[in-house]
Amino acid sequence: MPTTALLPSQACTTRLSKHSVRQRRDLASCALRSGAASTSRFASQASYRFRTQQHFSAGNSSLPLLRGSRRLAVQCSAVTLYGHPGTRSPLVDWYLHEIGIEYESKMPNAPGNPHPFGQVPALLDEGGVKVFESGAILLYLADKYGGLDTPDKRAAVTKWVIWANSSLDPILFKENDQGKVIGTGAAGDPKGLQRLEALLADSESDFLVGDEFSVADVAVASYLLYVPQFFPKISMGKWPSISSYMLRCAGRPAYEKAYGAQNTEYVRNTCIKYMSSEGVAPKGKTFKIF
Ligand SMILES: N[C@@H](CCC(=O)N[C@@H](CS)C(=O)NCC(=O)O)C(=O)O
């Protein structure tokens, strides 16, 4: 299990002299946020089970207003999310924490999983609403609870959520015909990542849509941030703006709530390594369940 120590901020500054002010700021704020080195990368199943026995209280007055959303106090809802920490489902947890929705978590094989293919994530909501496909779940939640209430607002983010699922996912995660992840396009230099790098480098915003974090960032950044978790030997340092964006998104408190403190610390530290162009692959086993 890798315990990637934080680079001293001075070392970062020296190594990153070629990087932008924004990238330096991301590193500095991350260094401030990170504490002691972790002993384990991923939230244990035991801790997940513990968490699933509770309804998450996700509201946090320090959360910034999400683009296109109302600032929401913790809302009681009938939302139930079927998922598991070693899958895509925590990306839905991430968004639920961002918008401050209380919900219940259930394991994939718990009774009542509405996914027609028996997969996760899958979501139940009041009125018998059943949603599967992570992107569809994000958009449903954004629509119902996140203030995505006009065609213009939907248009601004829907394209990114669809792009994440239909284009970015297959770039980053090559699957065999049994759905097992067997490789990543991040080992090469795919056109989709080249273009994303250029868009982020040219953008004046820290995030994909407008000036604020949105559901579009949850969709895109969650897939990017799975790369260090699944492929610890692959460096994304050849895309400095993507690496910096990943660090910004992993720095959100709601990300840590969804993915766990140890995993988040590992991911943040790996992004810092990408940005420092150390080229040193952290050692460790890959995450098997996806
Ligand atoms: N495109 C779907 C992928 C769903 C999927 O592949 N889920 C995996 C976990 S990430 C799963 O449930 N695998 C177990 C299985 O296929 O039985 C989504 O984004 O929700």
Image (cartoon, rainbow, N blue to C red):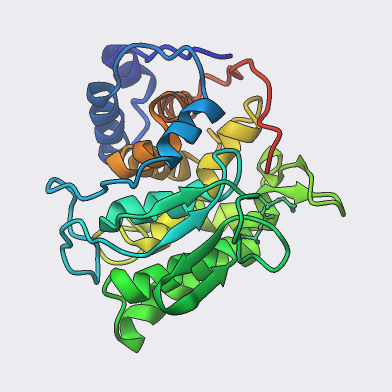
When the figure is inspected, residue 172 is found, relative to residue 209, above or below; the finding is above
Viewer-nearest residue: 279 or 248: 248
Q: Position of residue 105 (x, y in %)?
A: 46, 49
Pick the quarter of the image with the N terminus. top right
Residue 244 rendering spot, x and y as whole percentages: 39, 39
Q: Which corner quadrant of the figure contains ligand 1?
A: bottom right
Q: Is residue 50 above or below residue 8?
A: below
- Residue occupying the point 42% across, 30% down: 264
Q: Residue furthest left?
A: 61
Q: In the rendered image, which quarter is residue 45 located in?
A: top right
Rendered image quadrant of residue 87: top right
- Residue 114 x %, y %: 61, 66
Quarter in which the C terminus is drawn = top right
Is residue 187 among the parts visible in the rendering?
Answer: yes
Q: Nearer the viewer, residue 48 or 204?
A: 48
Q: Is residue 58 above or below residue 212?
A: above
Residue drawn at 59 percent across, 17 percent down: 282
* Tally of marks: 0
Percent of width and height locating residue 164: 55, 61
As drawn, which residue projects farthest toward the front? 111
In this view, the residue in front, 118 or 230, is 118
Residue 204 seen: no
Q: Is residue 113 left or right of residue 288?
A: left
Identity of the residue furthest to the right in this view: 177
Q: At 29% across and 58% down in the image, what residue appears? A: 101
> Who's the residue at 36% across and 65% down the image?
78
